[in-house]
Image: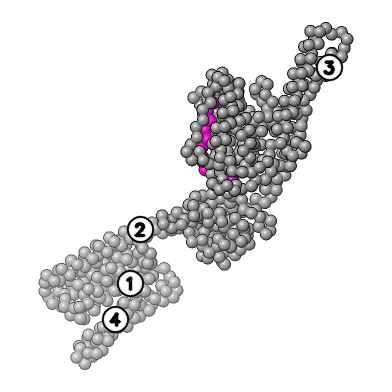
């Protein structure tokens, strides 16, 4: 029986049939043992009770259990009424008010409360009490206190069981509706999970497979029936390197992972994975649900797009460089042609000579900065403590002539004071120097520049493996800020909004960040009089002296610097 509801009528009727037959059989056997001493009317009554009860029970069983007919209200009333009459006859045959079988009325009343509506159960209780009283009066012609209490007990039992039966029946109906809705919801959910092309697996805190949808089974080439309820993480790791380990890491750290990319499988497939947690107990490891899909083709398309973007960037860079060189060369050529002429006085000659020198210096400075930009690469990889490096770069900035009337302030968080990254100290020094000098130039006379160094958890640098520690260098100034719509272009080579700028300083910062596995962004405006804010992110390495080596820059910068 399900908790909170009445048993099914057919199950109750099974016990009713059995109890009825056993009672009639017991009375008949008792009469048979005392056949010689018992009155003939008693033995006849016992025999008829057995015959009628057995026949009635057999016919009822055939109707409800063999032919599986649903018992209707009239059928149930007939069953309970027969049992009331049967118990009354048994009580009468066994001594009336002195009979030991009078408590059987309670069982009949309880059965009526279960099988019949509330009112029907009350009526059966009243009928049982009346028949008991009638039998006692007919047999003994007297009614004592015990008989009255017995009748009251029958009525109380009828009321109590009828009330409880009604409440349980109502609760059972409600539970039935809820179960039906849950069953429908589960069917709908199973249909959705079975039809989506995204793989979905759930592993419990012990690493056992709890659920796998058809798409996941197809992607992993496994049969769900072979692995449900069994340890599955090692199989996952062998089938899709990285998938089992990311689920285990998410389970042990109790943290969901938004983006992760597995290594290539034997079939050359790469999966993009995200995980969610279901925490069932504080001491138990959580269950992990991993959602993944095949991103092999998307990665190939991304590689083609990046290749096309690099080629387009080289073309744009070449065109920009040609444009920047063309203007000084045109001025130098014009001045040289005039100097070569005969009709020019000494004053004009001096002016033209100065023009040639200025434009030559400008061209030389432009080419020098471009070469520095093109040769951005880590020449030596070592452990670099970032906070001291930033202090040294700001000391150089403060000594710059353009920073004479600018306040430069540095704030370093305690956890970032000794943190380090793996890379080239000289290249990072140039990147920080360019960021701070750019802020000083935009802040202007009487302006302020604030540099903050802190450490945080982020997935900006590790989108394929979740959150990792990173150092952030934020440089803010009180200048006019980056105009709306220009934030995407400030790191482009030769793009500048400052008069006299070459547009290569911030481009060098970006290349230095990429060479170190970092990133640089135009951050959200701080408000309160602050203008632009730039944020440079660098990965954090351990305290060991052997930092992880990094690859050199791409082949394109090497080609540009040759």
From this view, report whether residue 529 is shown above or below residue 191: above
Q: Which residue is mark 2?
A: 171
Q: Residues within 10 Å of mark 3 (few under 14, many from 20)?
A: some
Sooner in the amino-acid sequence: mark 1 or mark 4: 4
In the rendered image, is residue 541 in sight?
yes
Sooner in the amino-acid sequence: mark 3 or mark 1: 1
Q: Secondary structure at mark 2?
A: helix
Viewer-nearest residue: 497 or 345: 345
Separation of disc 1 and disc 4 at Cα? 15 Å
Tag 1–tag 4 contact (CB < 8 Å): no
In the rendering, at what x and y percent does residue 326 appear? 79, 24
Tag 3–tag 1 contact (CB < 8 Å): no
Residue at horizontal 21 percent and vertical 75 percent from the top: 102
Viewer-nearest residue: 116 or 230: 230
Residue at horizontal 51 percent and vertical 40 percent from the top: 418
Q: Is residue 142 left or right of residue 351?
A: left
> Is 457 contained in the magenta span?
yes
């Amino acid at each position: 029986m399900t908790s909170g509801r009445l048993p099914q009528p057919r199950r109750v009727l099974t016990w009713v049939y059995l109890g009825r037959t056993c009672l009639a059989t017991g009375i008949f056997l008792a009469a048979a043992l005392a056949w010689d001493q018992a009155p003939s009317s008693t033995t006849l009554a016992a025999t008829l009770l057995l015959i009628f009860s057995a026949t009635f029970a057999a016919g009822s069983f055939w109707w409800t259990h063999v032919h599986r007919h649903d018992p209707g209200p009239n059928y149930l009333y007939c069953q309970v009424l027969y049992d009331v009459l049967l118990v009354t006859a048994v009580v009468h045959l066994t001594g009336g008010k002195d009979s030991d079988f009078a408590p059987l009325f309670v069982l009949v009343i309880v059965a009526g409360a279960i099988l019949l509506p509330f009112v029907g159960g009350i009526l059966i209780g009243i009928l049982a009490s009346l028949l008991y009283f009638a039998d006692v009066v007919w047999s003994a012609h007297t009614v004592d206190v015990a008989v009255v209490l017995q009748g009251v007990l029958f009525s109380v039992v009828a009321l109590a069981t009828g009330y409880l039966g009604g409440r349980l029946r109502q609760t059972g109906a409600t539970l039935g509706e809820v179960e039906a809705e849950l069953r429908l919801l589960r069917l709908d959910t199973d249909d959705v999970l079975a039809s989506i092309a995204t793989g979905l697996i759930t592993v419990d805190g012990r690493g056992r497979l709890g659920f796998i949808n058809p798409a996941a089974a197809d992607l992993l080439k496994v049969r769900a029936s072979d692995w449900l309820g069994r340890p599955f993480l090692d199989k996952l790791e062998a089938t899709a390197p990285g998938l089992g380990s990311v689920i285990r890491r998410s389970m042990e750290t109790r943290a969901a992972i938004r983006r992760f990319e597995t290594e290539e499988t034997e079939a050359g497939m790469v999966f993009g994975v995200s995980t969610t947690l279901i925490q069932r107990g504080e001491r138990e490891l959580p269950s992990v649900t991993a959602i993944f899909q095949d991103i092999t083709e998307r990665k190939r398309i991304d590689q083609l797009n990046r290749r096309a973007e690099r080629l387009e960037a080289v073309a744009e860079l070449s065109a920009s460089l040609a444009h920047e060189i063309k203007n000084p060369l045109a001025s130098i050529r014009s001045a040289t042609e005039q100097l070569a002429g005969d009709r020019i006085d000494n004053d004009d000659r001096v002016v033209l000579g100065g023009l040639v020198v200025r434009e030559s210096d400008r061209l030389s400075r432009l080419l020098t900065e471009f070469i520095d930009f093109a040769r951005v690469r880590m020449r030596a990889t070592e452990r670099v403590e970032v906070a001291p490096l930033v202090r040294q770069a700001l000391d150089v900035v403060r000594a710059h002539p353009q920073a004479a009337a600018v306040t430069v302030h540095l704030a370093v968080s305690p956890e970032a004071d000794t943190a380090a990254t793996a890379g080239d100290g000289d290249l990072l020094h140039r990147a920080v120097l360019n960021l701070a000098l750019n802020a000083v130039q935009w802040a202007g006379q009487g302006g302020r520049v604030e540099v903050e160094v802190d450490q945080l958890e982020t997935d900006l640098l590790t989108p394929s493996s979740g959150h990792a520690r990173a150092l952030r260098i934020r440089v803010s100034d009180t200048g006019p800020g980056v105009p709306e719509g220009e934030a995407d272009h400030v790191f482009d080579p030769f793009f500048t909004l400052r008069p006299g700028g070459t547009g290569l300083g911030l481009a060098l910062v970006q290349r230095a960040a990429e060479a170190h596995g970092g990133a640089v962004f135009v951050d959200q405006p701080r408000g309160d009089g602050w203008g632009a804010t730039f944020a440079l992110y660098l990965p954090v390495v351990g305290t060991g002296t052997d930092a992880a080596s990094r690859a050199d820059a791409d082949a394109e910068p090497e080609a540009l610097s040759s």
